[in-house]
Amino acid sequence: MTPRTPVPVPVQSLHLADAKEAEDLSAFLARLIHYDRAAAVRIQAGGEALAVFGRPPSFEVLAIRTARLAEPAAIDTTVSAGELLESLDGNRCTVPAAVTGPPWAGVLPPRGGWHGLAGLPPVRELRGAVAEAVAEFRARDEALPAGERTRAGRDRIGREIWSRTVGGTGLPLRAVHAAQSLGFLRPGAPADLLAASGWLRLRTPYGSVAVRTGGLGGLPLTPRRA
């Protein structure tokens, strides 16, 4: 009789493949909490692959970190990023109690159907573009007359700068800013631009940033700490 492939069953804990996977997941969760102490993440596992989705509010994009699991698992839930981080113990983590999912958690990028797009500049140029944009924002903010240095005035500047696209790709600069701030856009690392069903995705070995081509309901307005 041919042995049947084990079917993943719902779990209350996850066993990551090795210490490096656990470290990378910890760093990602810490970054999200850095921007939002009450951050929630949606976690999905199927077989030996885990995907963790978050939305840092400063950038209005979806951030995605994947990890390999040592044991097959099946799970799809939204939890507190802080509680998930605290639950990490070595290569294992306990799945926290589910929380009421924020609206973005119900609209995730498709799992398949992605295809590559040409025209994405090298990582060093992407990082340079972010640095130039941050410098431009600060210079224009400082140049505002005292009476115009309001939240609305700063918002106008930020909206103009961060909605610019990278080359002819259609990828908004805010997505690149998010990738760098979350530690995904590292010197020397490759980066790809993918598209599928109304989404663009900037992918690197350290994580991905996805944005709907119709927008996620806002733009980042001020440069944030990396």
Image: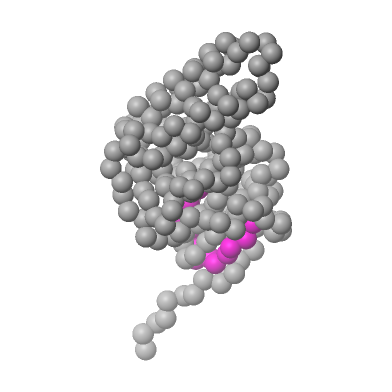
Q: Quadrant of the N terminus?
A: bottom left
84 to the left or right of 51:
right
Residue range (magenta) = 64-78
Residue 31 screen position, x and y as percent: 58, 37
Residue 210 position in % (x across, y down): 47, 46
| Image coords of residue 192 (percent x, y) | 34, 43
Residue at the bottom extreme? 1
| Residue depicted at 52% across the width and 61% down the height | 45
- Classify residue 146 as left or right of residue 127: right
- The dominant secondary structure in magenta is strand
- Tell me the residue at 71%/56% (across/down): 99
Q: Is residue 184 above or below residue 17?
A: above
**Residue 132 falls within the magenta-colored stretch:** no
214 up-or-down from 9: above or below? above
When the figure is inspected, residue 170 is found, relative to residue 69, above or below; the finding is above
Whether residue 172 is visible, yes or no, is yes
